[in-house]
Image (cartoon, rainbow, N blue to C red):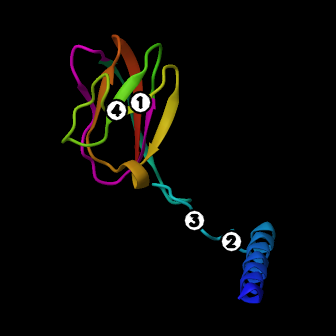
């Protein structure tokens, strides 16, 4: 029993080392990671600024087919974002984006549905949408 556990551990370590060596020498270089726009494909951009604040939730992106990613740049206040029309963001509900940050939300992870924003204080944010 003890010998089979040791043999299994040695075999698992050997597979792990083999995978590390394969990765080191570029065997997996053709594997694509998640991304909305494939390499070499044309992309179009639409940018604007939006006034947001605590007085109301503001839709910053609408449902759009073929979006690649969406970029949100916050300024002096943090934001709460909702990536679904079934939930409105508030001071305690949503995905938080810190103040003074720019984040790219990839469509493969966050989708191309409506995005609503709530800000802790009145501010203007910059938004961009890349589409194919």
- Looking at the picture, does residue 14 appear above or below residue 39? below
Q: Residue at x 47, y 54 (%)?
A: 42
Q: Which mark is residue 28?
A: 2
Kindly state the secondary structure of the residue where label 1 is placed.
Answer: strand
Q: Position of residue 74 (x, y in %)?
A: 45, 22
Mark 3 closeness class: few <14, some 14–19, many ≥20 residues within 10 Å = few
Q: Which residue is mark 3?
A: 32
Q: Which residue is mark 4?
A: 81
Q: Position of residue 130 (x, y in %)?
A: 42, 44
Residue 69 in view: yes
Quick one: label 2 or label 1, which is nearer the N terminus? Answer: 2
Q: Distance of mark 3 from mark 1, alpha carbons?
A: 28 Å
Q: Which mark is residue 54?
A: none
- Looking at the picture, does residue 9 appear above or below residue 114? below
Q: Distance of mark 2 from mark 1, alpha carbons?
A: 34 Å
Mark 4 closeness class: few <14, some 14–19, many ≥20 residues within 10 Å = many
Mark 2 closeness class: few <14, some 14–19, many ≥20 residues within 10 Å = few
Q: Distance of mark 3 from mark 2, alpha carbons?
A: 9 Å
- The part of the image, by quadrant, that contains residue 91 is top left
Kindly state the secondary structure of the residue where label 3 is placed.
Answer: loop
- Looking at the picture, does residue 42 appear above or below residue 81? below
Q: Which residue lies most toward the top here?
A: 122
Quick one: label 3 or label 4, which is nearer the N terminus? Answer: 3
Quick one: label 3 or label 1, which is nearer the N terminus? Answer: 3
Quick one: label 1 or label 4, which is nearer the N terminus? Answer: 4
Kindly state the secondary structure of the residue where label 2 is placed.
Answer: loop
Kindly state the secondary structure of the residue where label 4 is placed.
Answer: strand
Q: Residue at x 27, y 15 (%)?
A: 54
Q: Which mark is residue 96?
A: 1
């Amino acid at each position: 029993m003890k010998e089979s556990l040791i043999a299994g551990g040695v075999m698992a370590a050997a597979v792990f080392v083999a995978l590390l060596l394969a990765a080191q020498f570029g065997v997996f270089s053709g594997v694509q990671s998640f991304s909305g726009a494939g390499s070499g494909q044309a992309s179009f951009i639409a940018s604007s600024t939006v006034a947001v604040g605590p007085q109301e939730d503001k839709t910053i992106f609408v449902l759009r087919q073929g979006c690649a990613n969406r970029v949100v740049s916050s300024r002096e206040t943090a934001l709460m974002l909702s990536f679904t029309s079934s939930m409105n963001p508030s001071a305690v509900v949503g995905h938080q984006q810190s103040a003074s940050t720019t984040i790219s939300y990839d469509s493969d992870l966050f989708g191309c549905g409506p995005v609503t924003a709530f800000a802790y204080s009145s501010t203007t944010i910059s938004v961009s949408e890349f589409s194919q």
